[in-house]
Image (cartoon, rainbow, N blue to C red):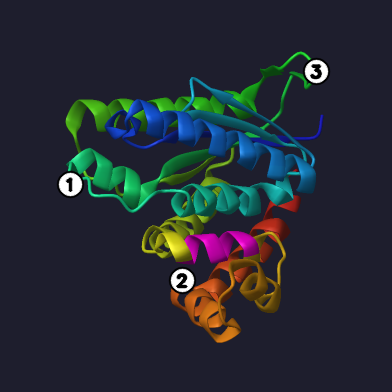
């Protein structure tokens, strides 16, 4: 049975959002799912408005989709005047995402059935991180995770994701928006037209967010994961 990757993600500190903000966020998450479905063979769903599950049928697409989700959420965060610590965490980190790599013993898009190690790995990791954060109020160190039944692979991906976490964690909402479009395949010229900004500005923002390293990481992930499918 060919392995798949299931992404489980939850919005960080979502309780800091107002009812209107939560409704707006849920609409944006559904918009994101629609964009992903148009571009990749996936199945995605939103649970309780702030929890995301995505089955990535081609595992090599998983890191790219993870970064698309991360950058989309960060770009969608309004720069409003809210000084609470929880809102600051939401604004800085957006969403935590775990990639579970393994088999799915039951997978039916039409019925919304997802069962197997892949979703067990990702779901368990997100539950662990959420529980630890809520109980201990610890500083968030990582928001991207990879879990499989292979310790060597997990260690390799942990190093890669830790570096990407820093790059994307430091990105502004505008940089995240530009990064999202670039990850989707738009050229710098196309992005400049779409966002009505100058092309050199697009290039500068992508350089600031570490585009070359991000692009190489996506390629590296695709190469490595194929050896483990």
Disc 1: which residue: 83
Asked if one can make out residue 164 in the rendered structure from this viewpoint, the answer is: yes
**Residue shown at the point (63%, 62%) measured from the top left:** 181
19 and 65: which is toward the camera: 19
- Left or right: 108 as drawn, with respect to 194: right
212 and 204: which is toward the camera: 204
Residue stretch rendered in magenta on the structure = 175-181
- Left or right: 119 as drawn, with respect to 92: right
- Mark 1: which secondary structure? loop
Q: Quadrant of residue 191?
A: bottom right
User: Tag 1: Cα neighbours inside 10 Å, few (<14), some, or many (≥20)?
Assistant: few
User: Tag 3: Cα neighbours inside 10 Å, few (<14), some, or many (≥20)?
Assistant: few
95 and 77: which is toward the camera: 77
Q: Quadrant of residue 113?
A: top right
The reply to whether dot 1 and dot 3 touch (C-beta < 8 Å) is no
**Residue shown at the point (53%, 55%) measured from the top left:** 156
Disc 2: which residue: 209
């Amino acid at each position: 049975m060919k392995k798949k990757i299931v992404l489980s993600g939850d919005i960080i500190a979502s309780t800091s959002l107002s009812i209107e903000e939560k409704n707006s966020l849920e609409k944006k998450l559904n918009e994101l799912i629609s964009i992903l479905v148009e571009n990749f063979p996936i199945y995605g769903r939103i649970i309780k408005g702030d929890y995301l599950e995505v089955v990535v049928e081609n595992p090599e697409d998983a890191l790219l989709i993870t970064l698309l989700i991360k950058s989309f959420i960060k770009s969608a965060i309004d720069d409003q005047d809210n000084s609470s610590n929880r809102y600051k965490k939401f604004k800085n980190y957006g969403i935590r995402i775990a990639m579970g790599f393994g088999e799915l013993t039951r997978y039916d898009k039409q019925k919304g059935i997802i069962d197997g190690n892949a979703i067990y790995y990702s779901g368990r990791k997100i539950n662990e991180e959420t529980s630890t954060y809520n109980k201990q109020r610890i500083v968030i160190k990582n928001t991207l995770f990879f879990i499989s039944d292979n310790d060597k692979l997990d260690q390799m991906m942990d190093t890669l994701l830790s570096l990407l976490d820093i790059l994307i964690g430091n990105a502004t909402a505008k940089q995240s928006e530009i990064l999202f479009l670039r990850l989707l395949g738009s050229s710098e010229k196309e992005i400049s037209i779409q966002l009505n900004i100058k092309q050199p500005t697009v290039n500068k923002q992508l350089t600031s967010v570490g585009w070359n390293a991000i692009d190489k990481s996506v390629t590296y992930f695709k190469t490595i994961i194929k050896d483990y499918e």
